Image: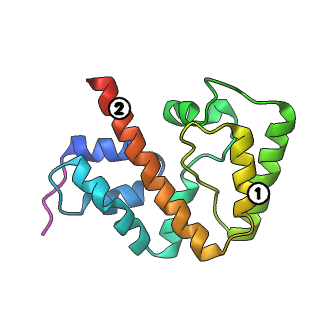
Amino acid sequence: MAAEPTAELHHQLDVLFEGAPHFVDRLAAEPASSLGELLDRAEHVALRLPEPEQIELLNAHPRIGAAPASVSKLSYREQGYDRDEGAPELQARLERLNDDYEQRFGFRFVIFVDGRSRSEIARLMQRHLRADRAAELRRGLSDVIAIARDRARKLEDADA
């Protein structure tokens, strides 16, 4: 039986997986003694979720190019708003691509931005629109975990 997660560990998961309380609760129920151990199990847990909970996890992330005021401080930096707010034409393109992607797959496009420009992300979104739905679901979930790992690393570095 898994030990009850500490309040601090649960809070850390809430920060890393903002807006996904069901996933955080499931992940926190995994046997682990540290955040690192939980992150090591996170993708396995996400891939085992019922599809509606997988979609909830993806949809917890803001849309690529969402209004800057509508995203968390972490998402704001991850999406590069602190570096480049982008041209209105690119913003309109991202909105169309988000709409097309969500219409085609039934869930939000999530990608580990990892310093890529918005125009590069738009090109990637266009390419992913041609992908298989099941493959996109797995890829998106994998990227959610990559984002959380990166957030954990950055928060740890900031605390050091």
Q: Is residue 19 shown left or right of residue 15?
A: right
Q: Position of residue 93 (x, y in %)?
A: 83, 45
| Residue at the image position 34 percent from the left and 37 percent from the top | 153
Identify the residue position indicated by label 1 in the image: 126
Q: Which of the pair 64/131 is nearer the observer?
A: 131
In reply to whether residue 73 is colored magenta, the answer given is no
Q: Which residues are magenta?
A: 1-5
- Scheme by which the image is coloured: rainbow
Q: Are marks 2 and 1 in contact (CB under 8 Å)?
A: no
Q: Is residue 137 above or below residue 118?
A: below
Amino acid at pointer 2: Leu
Q: Nearer the viewer, residue 56 or 108?
A: 108
- 95 relative position to 80: left or right: right
Residue at position x 14%, y 52% in the image: 33
Residue at 53% across, 34% down: 72
Q: Report which quarter residue 47 is drawn in.
A: bottom left
Q: Position of residue 102 (x, y in %)?
A: 71, 62
**Crowding at label 2, few (<14), some or many (≥20) Cα neighbours within 10 Å?**
some
Q: Earlier in the sequence, mark 2 or mark 1?
A: 1
Q: Quarter-wise, where is residue 89 in the image?
A: top right
- Check disc 2 and report the residue beneath it: 155
Left or right of 123 on screen, residue 143: left
Image x and y of residue 46, in percent: 41, 66
Residue 81 coordinates in the image, percent (x, y): 64, 28
Mark 1 neighbour class, 10 Å CA radius: few under 14, some 14 to 19, many 20 or more: some
Count of marks, rendered view: 2
23 versus 156 height, above or below: below
Res 39 quadrant in image:
bottom left
**Could you say whether the residue bearing mark 1 is in a helix, strand or loop?**
helix
Quadrant of the drawing holding the C terminus:
top left
Q: CA distance from mark 2 to mark 1?
A: 31 Å
